[in-house]
Amino acid sequence: QVVLVDSGGGLVQAGGSLRLSCAASGRTYSSYAMGWFRQAPGKEREFVAAISWSGGTIYYADFVKGRFTISRDNAKNTVYLQMNSLKPEDTAVYYCTAGISDYRPSDYWGQGTQVTVSS
């Protein structure tokens, strides 16, 4: 069992940056791939990024490549999403996830953190 608590969202102007964090608890945390998904108002939830348990394999959605960076610190049981060059269309609730799949880990979900990008 893994419990995820995500944080770091907020209001930022277009072109700005935010760093999301996700603190995980559970003895098997380091065995899971971690990821981030997001859901904008009126839209379906979509994949953003994922990182394998070792950090050696990373996936990004095309719309964040070159702007967002996912990383993890297994010693701190934490995964991060550094978001740069934010756009108004990045406005959404961002969810931290954990799971067996490196590609789309989604067995466990955090509560979500709101990111709002103003134009």
Image: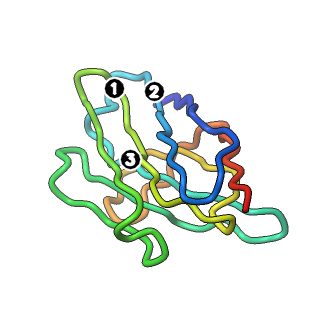
Label 2 crowd (10 A; few <14 / some 14-19 / many >=20): some
Question: Which residue sits at x=69%, y=50%?
Answer: 93
- Give the number of the disc on residue 67: none
Q: For numbered disc 1, what is the local secondary structure?
A: loop
Disc 2 residue type?
Answer: Ala
Q: Quadrant of residue 102?
A: bottom left
- Give the number of the disc on residue 34: 3
Residue 41 percent across, percent down from the top left = 82, 63
Question: Which residue sits at x=60%, y=68%?
Answer: 46
Classify 46 as above or below 28.
below
Circles 3 and 1, Cβ within 8 Å, touching? The answer is no
Residue hosting label 2: 23
Q: For numbered disc 2, what is the local secondary structure?
A: strand
Q: Quadrant of the C terminus?
A: bottom right
Disc 1 residue type?
Answer: Asn
Classify 67 as above or below 116.
below
Residue 30 percent across, percent down from the top left = 27, 34
Depth check: 94 or 17 in front? 17
Q: In the visual, does 53 lie left or right of 94?
A: left
Residue 87 percent across, percent down from the top left = 61, 65
Q: CA distance from mark 2 to mark 3?
A: 11 Å
Q: Earlier in the sequence, mark 2 or mark 1?
A: 2
Circles 2 and 1, Cβ within 8 Å, touching? The answer is yes
Label 1 crowd (10 A; few <14 / some 14-19 / many >=20): some
Residue hosting label 1: 77
